[in-house]
Amino acid sequence: MLQFIKSPERSYGEQLSLEKLGAVVQQLGAGFTWTKTPEEHRTALESAWKTAKECIEGGEYDLIILDELNNALAIDSFPIHDILPLNEVIEVLLNRPASLHVLITGRDAKDEIKAIADLVSVIEAEKHYYDEGVNAIYGIEY
């Protein structure tokens, strides 16, 4: 699992759980887009995409999760198209090894990504305790 937004400065529930199961989980981001400068995020996203391409093209894995790649591709508060080009993402996905499954997570998936996907699922909260002012809960969100 390659996490495009989450920072290695923190630990996350899914990271801890998956590592206990023997999965490789890497946080490659700079954190929430409002916590660092656009240049810090651009640098992290550029490096994350390079790592993702290497993993996809390397043939070592049979499943790669690109966590929050959809969120990264949807960033519009600073330019990302030169360091995370949608057309390149699509090309790499289309030319991946036949035995490789790629799972992409995050909100606001681009129509171009959905068009080449084998499966698209949308999970939406109908009701959430955040709306009542409850903060993230240990063991669930982190």
Image: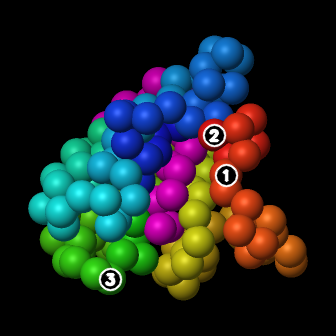
- What percent of the width, then of the height, locates residue 81? 23, 75
Q: Secondary structure at mark 3?
A: loop
Decide if residue 98 is on the left or right side of residue 136: left
Task: Give me the residue at 42% from left, 77% from top.
Answer: 74
Viewport quadrant of the C terminus: top right
Badge 2 crowding class, 10 Å Cα cut-off, few under 14, some 14 to 19, many 20 or more, is few
Task: Give me the residue at 59% from left, 58% from top.
Answer: 105
- What percent of the width, then of the height, locates residue 29? 34, 48
Residue 142 numbered tag: 2
Q: How many marks?
A: 3
Question: Which tag is nearer the camera, tag 1 or tag 2?
Answer: 1
Q: Earlier in the sequence, mark 3 or mark 2?
A: 3
Front residue (pair 8, 121): 8
Q: Earlier in the sequence, mark 1 or mark 3?
A: 3
Dot 1 and dot 2 residues touching (CB under 8 Å): yes
Quarter of the image holding residue 21?
top right
Residue 76 numbered tag: 3
Residue 136 numbered tag: 1
